[in-house]
Image (cartoon, rainbow, N blue to C red):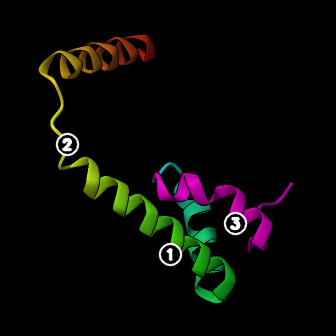
Amino acid sequence: MSRPDRYTCEETFRRLDDYLDRALGSAERALVEAHLATCEACASEYRFERGVLDTVRDRLAHLEVPASLKEKVRRALDSAREGER
């Protein structure tokens, strides 16, 4: 089965979260970017979702996180990384 040379709005929308999380491979990322460059409706949705993520990230940057929580998260991440190996 050959790979598509373009994505529809539905295909782009299904991949938008992964695109925003930088979790797509280069071929899929290129197809999403090509669609966003030609479809104002999808580009508008992308800008909205990107804005939400940026706002959340900015607000989270100003929160004080207890040291005990940081340590718990660090241990969980270390454990998950060990499980991937």
What whole-number distance in Å separates the C-alpha atoms at marks 1 and 2?
25 Å
User: What crowding class fits label 1: few (fewer than 14 Cα within 10 Å), some (14-19), or many (20 or more)?
Assistant: few
**x and y percent of residue 63 in the render?**
19, 42
The image quadrant that residue 74 belongs to is top left
The quadrant where residue 9 appears: bottom right
Disc 2/disc 3 C-alpha distance (Å): 33 Å
Give the percent coordinates (x, y) of residue 14: 71, 56
| Residue 8 magenta | yes
The amino acid type of the residue labelled 2 equals Leu
Q: Secondary structure at mark 1?
A: helix
Q: Which residue is at a point 56% across and 69% down the rendered structure image?
A: 30
Q: Which residues are magenta?
A: 1-21
Please state the horizontal and vertical placement of residue 65, each as a whole percent of the image. Answer: 18, 31
From the viewer's perspective, is the residue at label 1 or at label 3 nearer?
A: 1
SS at circle 3: helix
Look at mark 2 in the image and give the residue it sits on: 63
Disc ID at residue 47: 1
Please, is residue 84 above or below residue 64 in the view?
Answer: above
Query: Residue 47: x and y, percent?
Result: 50, 75
Against 34, residue 72 (above or below) is above
The residue where tag 3 is placed is 12
